[in-house]
Image (cartoon, coloured by chain):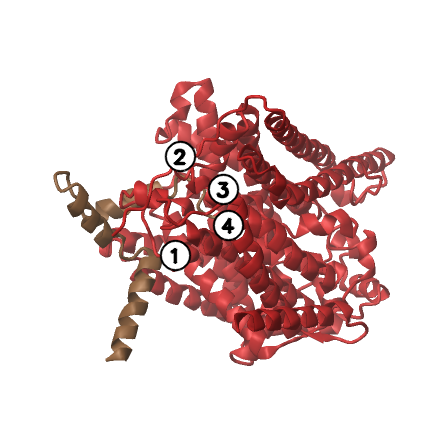
């Protein structure tokens, strides 16, 4: 099913581009590197990320 | 085979460019410009950027990037190069490259096209790529920090103060653009107002209902935004509601100021972050749509190649081609602001040094193409219509009959009926003197987009275009206020410790208010100025932005010399000299020119004389002292930018001189080489 595979690929790019999959990637990174530390839940992670992202120059003129 | 292909691209490019440049008397198709642009970008990307990457930046595929070395799953994340390209492009492409070229079309299309094409590939793209690599070699450090590490504290402080100042001017001028687009336009005002509750709704959705599901939230928001555009059109059937959204410029300015203050204080997840998701979607989508539409419709350029306004008498903004073309089109060619992004989020994401070319050089080339498209959208309007929309009442008179008579006398025929018909097609009450660039761009965009995707929807496309510009102007406005707030808190923290705590509420309130006060003042003056404010603020913004670019190029040049690559100094040195010449000349003329529309001091004196002699129109008397004070303040500001620029240039020359003469300088702050681990 190439159509389906194609759609999967587009979807995963879109998710990565928009940051939609940020939590999944965080969980993966966390389990690999700091399994001993507290894992944030989805909402906590989202809020912490927004705070971090908007602390510097992110948008231009 | 490859050689043949590149030779073909070179020939097609040269042919199109010659077509664009040499066509006289006949109108040309926009496609020529697009083809010339794409050929120039491809060639310079293939050859010049590859040469710089190999020889000057000595890009090393085996060297681990900060994203790889410092991977923490958050800000340092090795990311697919196309994804980084998308992020970086979304970060650098703002309203600037749309507005500057629109204004500069008053000189004719040719000067703008040539400057955008040639300027981008030898200055802007080089700056972005070089700063990106320098930052990547320094763990993703910021421009200000790099200036301090490489040149010394003087350079560092100059970069920091410069950034803060440009932020204030930038927000003021963008605020003015939105105000002018909404003035007496209930449809536009309703749509722009509606974006705020929509953003808040999405913010709540992304926090409480479906945390972090950005894609869903953004799509939902887009549907709501389009509904708001359509809903705004229905306003015309309800006279009471229609009147409720009909505001004067000054009222809208106060609204924007209040909005900016509230947005900067609110938590980011509630307003700023969700609106940024929406504006990013909208921005990338609309730019893609516009490019596709220009290629499909292939509109005819109606603006002449050159107009008589290159002599400095232009109605949109005053000043000769040199230096003012190069100040007006800053973003889209070279923008100092990019160096902040290229030394901010992006360097922490790049997986391999070889991607720097595509991300740094390639993104800027694409942004330059956006600028070309904006220029086409303005140049396809009837010149008479373009000037009627963009000339302030202070220059052509506030009565439509006077305005069309004056514009027609310049050789650009236009009639009141034609303007009224156009306004009603666009769903507006009037399009006279809608300065700032946004309305004329929206008219241009609407005519291309409706020709390509749905005839008869002109009014909808027009207001879609206005909403599109307003949404990301508002994002820049509160993101900028926040950044300004952080910088100010940092500065004030040196004076009194508690002010430096970024999450301490009194400190947040005080510093946010100070930043808003700063840009709010310039916005207020811009709105009450009878010459339309844009004539003052856009050149100031251009000077500030080019000054910041010059600071970035100083850092790059200093590093090149310190790396014992003196023979390559011209790669960033020549763009630096050009910017220094442009910025200094423009600042000098803005301060000292005798022409009242150019020189701040001359304008202040002329108004003061008129006030004293009692020859000022009654309406202007109460605001005259403000305007006089403001012109003098602007003169000081322009002088300040020029002085700051020369301080950092002299500091760079000092460093270069010491290197050449074998005297000690600060060591290169590059992090040591770490090899990429084989997988």
Disc 3 and disc 1 in contact, CB within 8 angstroms? no
For the residues carrying marks 1 and 2, which lies nearer the camera in this image? 2
- Chain of the residue under label 3: B
Q: In this view, does B368 lie above or below B537?
A: below
Residue identifier under label 2: B671
Q: In this view, does B172 lie above or below A25?
A: above
Asked if residue B308 lies left or right of residue B471, the reply is: right
Circle 2 residues within 10 Å: few <14, some 14–19, many ≥20: few
Q: Is residue B255 visible?
A: no
State how far apart marks 2 and 3 are (Cα).
Answer: 20 Å
Q: Colour of chain A?
A: brown
Circle 1 residues within 10 Å: few <14, some 14–19, many ≥20: some
Residue identifier under label 1: B81
For the residues carrying marks 2 and 3, which lies nearer the camera in this image? 2
For the residues carrying marks 1 and 4, which lies nearer the camera in this image? 4
Asked if residue B598 lies left or right of residue A40, the reply is: right
For the residues carrying marks 3 and 1, which lies nearer the camera in this image? 1
Residue identifier under label 3: B340
Label 4 sits on a secondary structure element that is helix
Q: Residue at x 77, y 49 (%)?
A: B322
State how far apart marks 3 and 1 are (Cα).
Answer: 20 Å
Label 1 sits on a secondary structure element that is helix
Q: Which residue is drawn at 41% across and 31% down?
A: B508
């Amino acid at each position: 099913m190439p159509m389906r595979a194609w759609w999967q690929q587009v979807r995963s790019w879109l998710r990565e581009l928009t940051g939609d999959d940020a939590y999944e990637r965080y969980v993966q990174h966390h389990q690999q590197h700091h399994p001993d530390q507290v894992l944030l839940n989805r909402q906590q992670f989202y809020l912490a990320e927004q705070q971090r992202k908007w602390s510097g120059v992110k948008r231009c003129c | 085979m490859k050689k043949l292909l590149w030779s073909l691209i070179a020939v097609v490019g040269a042919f199109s460019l010659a077509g664009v440049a040499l066509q006289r008397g006949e109108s040309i198709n926009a496609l020529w410009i697009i083809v010339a642009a794409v050929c120039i970008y491809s060639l310079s990307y293939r050859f010049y950027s590859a040469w710089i990457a190999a020889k000057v930046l000595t890009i090393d595929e085996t060297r681990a990037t900060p994203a790889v070395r410092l991977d923490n799953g958050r800000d340092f994340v090795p990311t697919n190069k196309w994804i980084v390209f998308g992020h970086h492009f979304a970060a650098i492409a703002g309203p600037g490259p749309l507005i500057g070229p629109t204004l500069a079309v008053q000189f004719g299309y040719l000067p703008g096209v040539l400057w955008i094409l040639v300027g981008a590939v030898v200055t802007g793209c080089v700056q972005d790529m070089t700063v990106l690599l320098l930052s990547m070699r320094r763990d993703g450090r910021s421009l200000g920090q790099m200036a301090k590490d490489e040149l010394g504290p003087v350079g560092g402080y100059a970069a920091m103060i410069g950034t803060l100042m440009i932020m204030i001017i930038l927000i003021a001028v963008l605020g003015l653009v939105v105000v002018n687009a909404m003035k007496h336009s209930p449809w536009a005002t309703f749509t722009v107002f509606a974006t705020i509750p929509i953003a808040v709704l999405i913010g709540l959705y992304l926090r409480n209902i479906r945390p972090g599901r950005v894609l869903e939230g953004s799509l939902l928001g887009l549907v709501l935004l389009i509904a708001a555009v359509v809903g705004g059109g229905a306003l015309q059937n309800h006279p009471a509601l229609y009147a409720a959204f009909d505001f004067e410029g000054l009222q809208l300015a106060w609204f924007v100021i209040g909005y900016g203050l509230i947005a900067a204080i609110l938590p980011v997840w509630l307003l700023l972050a969700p609106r940024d998701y929406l504006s990013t979607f909208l921005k990338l989508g609309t730019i893609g749509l516009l490019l596709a539409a220009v290629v499909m419709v292939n509109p005819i350029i109606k603006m002449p190649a050159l107009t008589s306004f290159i002599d400095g008498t232009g109605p949109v903004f005053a000043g000769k081609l040199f230096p003012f073309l190069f100040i007006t089109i800053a973003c889209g060619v070279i923008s100092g602001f990019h160096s902040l992004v290229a030394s901010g989020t992006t360097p922490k994401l790049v997986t391999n040094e070889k991607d720097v070319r595509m991300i740094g050089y390639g993104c800027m080339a694409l942004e330059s193409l956006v600028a070309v498209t904006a220029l086409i959208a303005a140049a396809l309007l009837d010149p008479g219509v373009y000037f009627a929309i963009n000339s302030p009442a202070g220059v052509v008179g506030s009565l439509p009959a006077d305005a069309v008579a004056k514009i027609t006398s310049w050789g650009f025929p236009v009639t009141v009926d034609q303007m009224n018909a156009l306004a009603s097609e666009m769903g507006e009450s009037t399009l006279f003197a809608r300065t700032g660039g946004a309305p004329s761009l929206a008219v241009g965009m609407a005519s291309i987009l409706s020709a390509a995707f749905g005839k008869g929807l002109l009014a909808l496309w027009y207001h879609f275009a206005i909403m599109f510009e307003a949404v990301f102007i508002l994002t820049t406005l509160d993101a900028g206020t926040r950044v300004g707030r952080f910088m100010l808190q940092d500065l004030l923290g040196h004076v009194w410790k508690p002010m430096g705590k970024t999450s301490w509420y009194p400190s947040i309130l005080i510093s946010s208010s100070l930043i808003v006060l700063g840009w709010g003042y310039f916005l207020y003056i811009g709105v009450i100025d009878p010459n339309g404010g844009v004539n003052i603020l856009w050149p100031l913004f251009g000077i500030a932005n080019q000054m910041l670019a010059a600071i970035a190029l100083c850092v790059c040049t200093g590093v090149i010399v310190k790396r014992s690559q003196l023979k390559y100094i011209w790669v960033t040195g020549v763009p630096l000299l050009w910017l220094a010449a442009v910025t200094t000349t423009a600042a000098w003329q803005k301060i000292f020119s005798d022409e009242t529309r150019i020189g701040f001091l001359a304008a202040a004196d002329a108004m003061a004389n008129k006030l004293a002699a009692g020859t000022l129109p009654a309406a202007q008397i109460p605001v005259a002292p403000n305007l006089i004070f403001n012109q003098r303040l602007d003169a000081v500001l322009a002088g300040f930018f020029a002085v700051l620029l020369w301080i950092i240039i002299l500091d760079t020359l000092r460093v270069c001189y010491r290197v050449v003469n074998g005297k000690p300088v600060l060591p290169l702050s590059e992090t040591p080489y770490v090899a990429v681990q084989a997988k």
